[in-house]
Image (tube, helix red, strand yellow):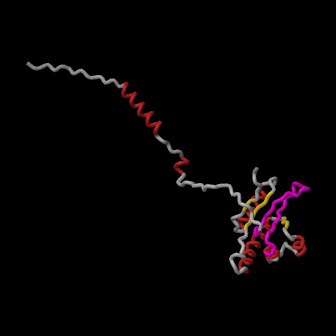
Amino acid sequence: MPKVKMKRTGFVIDMTPLVDITFLLLTFFMFTAKFKSDADNEQKFQIKRPKSAADTSKLPEKDVAVIKIALDSTKVADTAYYYSVSNPELWNLVKEDPSLSEWLTPARKELSKSQIKTIKVDELEALVKATRTQSKAFNAMKKSKAEQASLKFAVDADRRVRFKWIADVMEVMRRSRQTQFNFVTDKEQ
């Protein structure tokens, strides 16, 4: 007699715990994954900024060229540049520079014993360039290193002056290849 095969009954798997585990894994990966932004993908460099500290050094008494930006006391709207060099020998050489002869007339030279009031930025640029070249020539005339001077530039501006005037001076210094200069400030109390 043939054996009667029993019908197999299927087994049932409860899927509820598997769905729970799937969602737990999905949330775990979502919270731990770091998504890159478009900016992170595009930026291929790192900026390392220099450390800085306040420089409280004093301006030297000798061998300094000062560009003053001042307001006229009678008309506050009038702003002017004043240029001076502390070394009198170098100052006389600067005033006699041939590149300044176009606008620095003999009468104006007489009025400028200690400083020159400039009206235009071009005049200021010519003065800075002439000072640099005459400073190099002045140092070449000196025999010993002790007599030679390292000329420094400084910008002394009234705090009420608009920044445009200071930016113009900075641009003049950049065009004259004088990239190191000081700002004159008062010490905070």
Query: Residue 93's x, y, as percent?
Result: 80, 76
Left or right, 133 with respect to 3, comes to: right
Against 26, residue 173 (above or below) is: below
Residue under the image location 79 percent in, 67 percent down: 124
* Quadrant the N terminus occupies: top left
Residue under the image location 70 percent in, 75 percent down: 146
Is residue 25 or residue 9 the one in the foreground? Answer: 25
- In the image, farthest residue toward the right: 74
The mark tally for this picture is 0
Give yes or no for residue 170 being in the magenta stretch.
Answer: no
Quarter of the figure with residue 116: bottom right
Range of residues picked out in magenta: 62-89
Residue under the image location 41 percent in, 33 percent down: 25
- In the image, farthest residue toward the left: 1
Residue under the image location 79 percent in, 70 percent down: 127
Is residue 60 or residue 155 the one in the foreground? Answer: 60
Query: Residue 92's x, y, as percent?
Result: 82, 75
Is residue 86 or residue 181 the one in the foreground? Answer: 86
Is residue 6 or residue 38 the one in the foreground? Answer: 38
Left or right, 165 with respect to 74, comes to: left
Query: Residue 109's x, y, as percent?
Result: 87, 73
Quarter of the figure with residue 120: bottom right
